[in-house]
Image (cartoon, rainbow, N blue to C red):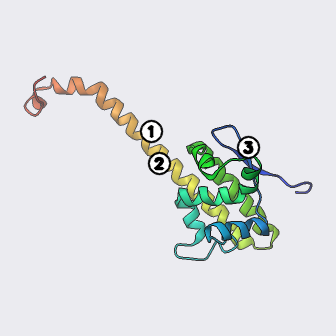
């Protein structure tokens, strides 16, 4: 892969596009604002990478710290930024952050951390898919119950356990 840098961007629910770029300056800004060291993803218990993947507020705070110069330039406050982060925007921001972390750590020669970030992203994707599958299955079971429930209540065996309508 050659050529220019691919910008990691996401769009919030207000239609604003944000660019996530991890530089030493950005890492220092995140550390100064949040006391979170993005260069030590494997530190802590649970590790920072896991905390970012499971704590949505921490994720959004990290993303805001990364895009703060853009927010300041457009007079967007932390509260306005957070207000424009619906579910899809958060997922897009998380994806952009993970892609940027992988890019940064590969460039730094830390393939181990790049692989860890990629594995975390895949694990979250798999968990979301599994939950969606379960929800789809539950919705199907609920639909069957709703559709067939009426006919079941008229069966003699269930008449005694079904309250009168």
**First in sequence: mark 2 or mark 3?**
3
Which residue position holds label 1?
A: 136
Q: Residue at x 69, y 37 (%)?
A: 15
Res 116 seen here: no
Quarter where residue 62 is shown: bottom right
Quarter where residue 61 is shown: bottom right
Give how far across and how far down residue 9 sits, in percent.
74, 48
**First in sequence: mark 3 or mark 1?**
3
Q: Disc 1 to disc 2, how far (Cα)?
A: 9 Å
Describe the element under mark 1 as helix, strand or loop: helix
Q: Does residue 7 appear to the left or right of 42 in the view shown?
A: right
The foreground one among 117 and 96 is 96
Give how far across and how far down residue 67 sits, in percent.
72, 55
Which class describes the residues within 10 Å of circle 1: few (<14), some (14-19), or many (20+)? few
**Residue placed furthest toward the right:** 3
Which class describes the residues within 10 Å of circle 3: few (<14), some (14-19), or many (20+)? few
Give how far across and how far down residue 17 sits, in percent.
73, 43
Which residue position holds label 2?
A: 131
Describe the element under mark 2 as helix, strand or loop: helix
Q: Residue at x 43, y 45 (%)?
A: 134
Q: Does residue 135 appear to the left or right of 11 in the view shown?
A: left
Q: Disc 3 to disc 1, how far (Cα)?
A: 32 Å
Give how far across and how far down residue 53 sits, in percent.
57, 60
Which residue position holds label 3?
A: 17
| Tag 2 and tag 3, C-beta contact below 8 Å | no
């Amino acid at each position: 892969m050659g050529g220019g840098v691919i910008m990691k961007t996401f769009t919030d629910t207000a239609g604003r596009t944000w660019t996530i770029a991890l530089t030493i300056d950005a890492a220092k800004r995140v550390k100064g604002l949040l006391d979170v060291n993005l260069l030590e993803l494997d530190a802590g218990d649970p590790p920072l990478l896991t905390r970012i993947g499971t704590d949505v507020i921490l994720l959004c705070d990290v993303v805001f710290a990364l895009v703060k110069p853009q927010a300041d330039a457009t007079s967007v406050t932390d509260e306005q930024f957070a207000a424009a982060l619906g579910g899809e925007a958060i997922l897009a921001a998380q994806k952009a952050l993970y892609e940027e972390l992988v890019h940064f750590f590969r460039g730094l020669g830390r393939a181990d951390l790049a692989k860890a970030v990629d594995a975390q992203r895949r694990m979250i994707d798999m968990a979301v898919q599994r939950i969606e599958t379960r929800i789809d299955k539950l919705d199907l079971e609920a639909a069957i119950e709703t559709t067939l429930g009426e006919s079941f209540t008229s069966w003699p065996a269930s008449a005694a356990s079904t309250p009168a309508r």
